[in-house]
Image (spheres, rainbow, N blue to C red):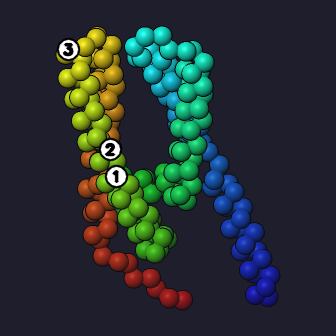
Amino acid sequence: MTGERSVTEQATAQTSATTGDRLDAAGWAQLAFGAAAGLATGVGVGLSAHGPFPWVTVVVLGVALGVVFPVALLRAWWARGGRNTLVETRAWVRSGRVPDEVPDTVWRPRVRQLLGDSSRQLFGAWAAAVVACLWAALAISGETRDWAFAAVWAVLAAVQFVQVRKVRPSARRLLDAPARVVASV
């Protein structure tokens, strides 16, 4: 009987794992945005280069980055248990509450990982702010298109600062909560 149960449990776990890894519309949109950002970066490099820049280089760089950006995003999701796991963890942090049926051994490591990710994102936000300032300094004595690059980096930094500000305090409050006692049957 226990052999049948473990086979059934395995089948259920496999079914939930395959349906849980499917991307929703927002996930596909993020991947498409990553591909578009990669292509735009290739074109931006070509437009910002001084002197003639071979269009083949622009196309190859744009296509390469258009593939690398979404693959890096997929890899980041896979490293955290899939996009749905990450979305679920963010929902817990945003609401400040974890469902009672989720054990501490599951949600605490996820929230700790999200807090660690936000620390890295905070570092990235400060780095983007520094790049924005440096590009603005170049724009003062340079060309007007440099202001566009400074603005892009400033917006990137601002978005990251806002995201970090939303996650960190809520995640810390959840982790500071006392562990729940699970009643044994």
According to the picture, the residue beneath numbered tag 3 turns out to be: 141
> Which residue carries the number 1 mark?
120
- Dividing the image into 4 quarters, which one contains the N terminus? bottom right
Q: Residue at x 76, y 74 (%)?
A: 8
The mark nearer the N terminus, 1 or 3, is 1
Foreground disc of the pair 1, 3? 3
Q: Secondary structure at mark 2?
A: helix
Residues marked 2 and 1 touching at CB (< 8 Å): yes
Q: Report the residue at 34% width, 58% height from top.
A: 115
Q: Residues within 10 Å of mark 1 (few under 14, many from 20)?
A: few
Q: Amino acid at mark 2?
A: Gly
Q: Are marks 1 and 3 in contact (CB under 8 Å)?
A: no
Instruction: Provide the secondary structure element on which disc 1 rests.
Output: helix
- At label 3, which amino acid type do we have? Ser
- Rounded to the nearest angstrom, the CA distance separating label 3 from label 2 is 26 Å
Image-quadrant location for residue 136 = top left
- Above or below — where is 89 with respect to 6? above
- Of residues 165 and 177, the one nearer the viewer is 165
From the top left corner, tell me how far across and down residue 42 is, in percent. Answer: 51, 24
Residue 72 in view here: yes
Q: Quadrant of residue 177?
A: bottom left
Judge the density around disc 3: few (<14), some (14-19), many (≥20) Cα neighbours within 10 Å: few
Q: Which residue is mark 2?
A: 124
